[in-house]
Image: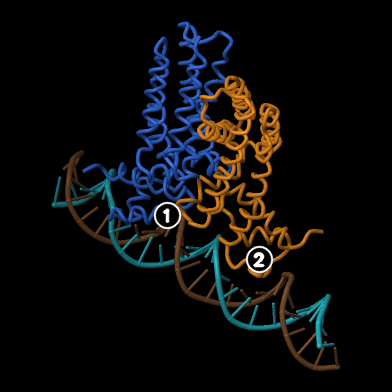
Chain colours: A orange, B blue, C brown, D cyan
Amino acid sequence: MTDTRTEILHKNYEAIHRNGFQGVRADKVVAEMGITKGALYHYFPNKFDLGYAILDELLAPHYLKIWQPFERAEKNFGVVLLDVLESYRDFAKTDEEIKLGCPLTNLTQEMPPLDEGFRKRLHRITHQMQLQVETGLKNAQLAGEFKLDFNPTQTAFFYLSAIEGGFSVAKAMQSRAAFEMVIAQLKQFSEGLKV
Amino acid sequence: MTDTRTEILHKNYEAIHRNGFQGVRADKVVAEMGITKGALYHYFPNKFDLGYAILDELLAPHYLKIWQPFERAEKNFGVVLLDVLESYRDFAKTDEEIKLGCPLTNLTQEMPPLDEGFRKRLHRITHQMQLQVETGLKNAQLAGEFKLDFNPTQTAFFYLSAIEGGFSVAKAMQSRAAFEMVIAQLKQFSEGLKV
DNA sequence: AGGTAAACATACCAATTAGTATGTCAAGTT
DNA sequence: AACTTGACATACTAATTGGTATGTTTACCT
């Protein structure tokens, strides 16, 4: 059995994913675990710090890990891309996950205007993801994979946008097929970049 | 001076855009207008119906109008695309608007798991937007603009995803430049589709 | 054995929330 | 002139919220 703090983090992460941060009643979440507010406020001073911990300890590591393969891309850029896209597909493999959408995007829509702590953290995670892709693209370009006139920074933003956007549109449409189509198009797009 | 109901709609729309639906205190919003809850509940039976009215009367018409040019696209597809992208840029022309993000995406992340009425409406709006793009792409294809092997449905989803995703990433990064980069890439992508 | 601190539980509270019940007033309608 | 109706305002409530103050228990340390 996992320790209480970790379980509080995970259960509240799920609740946030389902209801949004503002929709979560943190004490009800822990009550469903069979414990009380006492435990919650023992480990976290308040609701926002609980949210920060979820971002720092769960979300950030998870997303950085998904995009990590890019950092080691060179000649094999195409394979790496397929890897990452596969991770994302795994990430949203059930219909329910499609309906809930991307946790990062969810929070990015909800929180930045409301809280500075969330804003900074979401900014940093997104920035790091973008850098990971950009690094991969640059390495691949140096390795001669891509045309020389292409712009790695722009392309990195485009990859991020298309994937996160695809996740979002799939949520709106409640259709995994929509997400798959975006992935297919993204692969095609990447082929077009090759030298 | 505009009538009270319309003003309630607009002011609450802004509040939702800023705080999310769950974050809006509808009575405070009308209080800032100088009126009271009496007026609010006179025109709308409850908070959700107010939300529905905002979707039906403000958001849906707005988005459908933005994407409408596609429905008349043929040989001029490139021009039409520039038109729509320009509308989007207009839509997010201030830094503040970038920071708040796309109202449609915001609500799409927040509401569908919480309420069926929102879910259906957001689904329908997105679906209609996708159809508009798809129609344009098909017409352009028939007019000989595109390669025959391309898939209009997939491409329509891709356009939507990239644009909405670009908006979302720009919000996370608090950078209009990020949005501009995605738009630039999308234009380039479209060039590649041409015959 | 006595003391201390971590890990919770219990009981409570002040503020806020959506929503309601009732009242008022001006503009038509008959 | 009496009556109705639409357009609000005022005052209230029941439920919920995040958060706190105060136990209690168990493990550990000396």
Q: What amino acid type is highlighted by mark number 1?
A: Arg
Three-letter code for the amino acid on which mark 2 is drawn:
Leu
Where is D14 relative to B165, above or below? below
**Residue corresponding to mark 1:** B25
Residues at marks 2 and 1 on the same chain:
no
The residue closer to the viewer here, A124 or B165, is: A124
Choose between A144 and D2: the one closer to the eye.
Answer: A144
Looking at the picture, how far across and down is residue A60, in whole percent?
63, 49
* Residue tagged 2: A40
Residue A41 percent coordinates (x, y) = 63, 68
Query: Neighbour class for label 2 at 10 Å: few (<14), some, many (≥20)?
Result: many
Instruction: Name the chain letter of the residue that bears numbered label 2.
Output: A
Q: Residue sitting at 66 percent across and 70 percent down?
A: A42
Residue A60 sits above or below residue B192 on the image: below
Element under label 2?
helix
For the residue labelled by badge 1, is the local secondary structure a helix, a strand or a loop?
loop
Quadrant for residue C30, please give it: top left
Q: Nearer the viewer, residue A67 or D4?
A: A67
Instruction: Please provide percent x and percent y for residue A55.
Output: 61, 53
- The local crowd at label 1, few if under 14, some if 14 to 19, many if 20 or more residues have their Cα within 10 Å, is some
Q: Nearer the viewer, mark 2 or mark 1?
A: 2
Above or below: residue A29 compared with residue B191 = below
Q: Are marks 2 and 1 in contact (CB under 8 Å)?
A: no
Q: B7 or B84, which lies in front? A: B84
Q: Residue at x 56, y 35 (%)?
A: A160
